[in-house]
Image: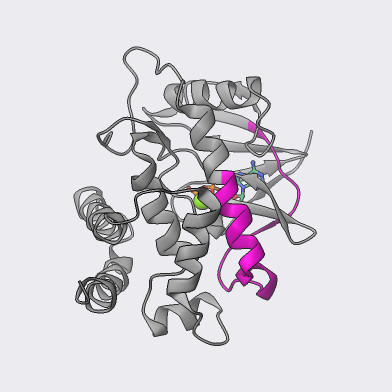
């Protein structure tokens, strides 16, 4: 039998590594997530884990070898090249999910957002990506996935990748100096091929507000809420007051 090794870094789940597999707890949303993972694998998307087994309480996934982008971020994870790779990966994921048929009676962890253009990962950030040789090779943690717009998912991604956070939060994430957030935001949108950027910043603020509401409603990670609220103030003061 393989020894079970707890995997840390994530915030919500008990996750264990067993051999080259990962054992995770399931929830009401898991039948939907499993259908999504099968769809991705069937369409040749190699960055998501393969679903190996699902029981009423647990799921077993393939373990993706590499380094996860947890804080403090390694310097190579802060490069423009990684912003471009991340945006292109999110674009491919969205394009592949545009025709995904949602199983009847599907439940989602987070509310579906209209318009339903694609499946949003809803937690697309360095801490849910796996790197090998300084390149992104894996995308994990699909629990929060739900139907929504491309913009809704891009909003959270640019919040994390630009990152659209206070200077103090930037330093806490492992940035040795404050990056040019506007330039990295533009780079992400260019690499994704986002056409209409006008509503993006407003959507970022709505996305963060929805996250704070979810944390309050579920009393989860309550200690993180002040950080999100400070980031919201920063985004409004820096990006919304100019228009
Ligand atoms: N399929 C996988 N391949 C490699 N590592 C994984 C995989 N799934 C989870 N992990 C590791 O376990 C940690 C927590 O898992 P994750 O699925 O992100 O759950 P959560 O963030 O909800 O706790 C991740 O940060 C990562 O280090
Ligand atoms: Mg995670």
Q: Residue furthest front?
A: 195
Looking at the picture, tell me which residue is in the foreground, 227 or 86: 86
The total of numbered circles placed on residues is: 0
Query: Which residue is most to the top?
Result: 104
Instruction: Identify which residue is drawn at 40% across, 14% down.
Output: 103
Residue at 52 percent across and 63 percent down: it is 187
Residue 128: x percent and y percent? 55, 52
The image shows residue 239, relative to residue 30, as above or below, that is: below
The N terminus - image quarter: top right
Whether residue 205 sits left or right of residue 174 in the image: it is left
Does the image show residue 124? yes
Left or right of 2? Residue 225 is: left
Residue 42, located in which quarter of the rendered image? Answer: top right
Is residue 181 shown in magenta?
no
- Name the spot of residue 9 as percent of width and height, x first: 56, 59
Q: Nearer the viewer, residue 136 or 80?
A: 80
Horizontally, residue 241 falls left or right of residue 197, namely: left
The quarter of the picture where residue 135 lies is: bottom right
Point out residue 68 in the picture as x, y percentages from the top left corner: 64, 57
Part of the protein shown in magenta: 61-89
The residue that appears at 78% across and 38% down in the rendered structure is 2
Quarter placement of the C terminus: bottom left
Of 6 and 193, nearer the camera is 193
Q: How is the image coloured?
A: one colour
Residue 23 drawn at (x, y percent)? 61, 36
Residue 7 to residue 21: above or below: below
């Amino acid at each position: 039998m393989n020894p079970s090794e707890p995997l840390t870094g994530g915030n919500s789940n008990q996750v264990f590594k067993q051999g080259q597999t990962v054992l995770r707890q399931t929830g009401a949303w898991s039948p939907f997530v499993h259908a999504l993972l099968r769809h991705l694998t069937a369409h040749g998307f190699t960055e998501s884990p393969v679903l190996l087994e699902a029981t009423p309480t647990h799921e077993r996934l393939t373990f993706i070898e590499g380094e996860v982008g947890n804080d403090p971020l390694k310097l190579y994870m802060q490069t423009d090249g990684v912003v471009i790779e991340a945006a292109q990966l999110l674009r491919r994921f969205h394009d592949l999910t545009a025709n995904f048929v949602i199983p009847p009676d599907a439940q989602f962890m987070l509310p579906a957002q209209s318009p339903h253009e694609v499946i949003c990962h809803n937690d697309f950030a360095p801490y849910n990506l796996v790197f090998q040789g300084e390149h992104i090779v894996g995308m994990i943690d699909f629990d929060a996935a739900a139907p929504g717009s491309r913009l809704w998912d891009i909003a959270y991604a640019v919040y994390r990748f630009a990152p659209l956070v206070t200077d103090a939060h930037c330093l806490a994430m492992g940035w040795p100096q404050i990056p040019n957030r506007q330039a990295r935001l533009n780079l992400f949108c260019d690499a994704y091929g986002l056409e209409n950027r006008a509503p993006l910043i407003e959507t970022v603020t709505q996305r963060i507000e929805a996250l704070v509401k979810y944390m309050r409603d579920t009393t989860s990670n309550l200690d993180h809420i002040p950080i999100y609220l400070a980031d919201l103030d920063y985004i409004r003061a820096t990006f919304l007051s100019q228009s």
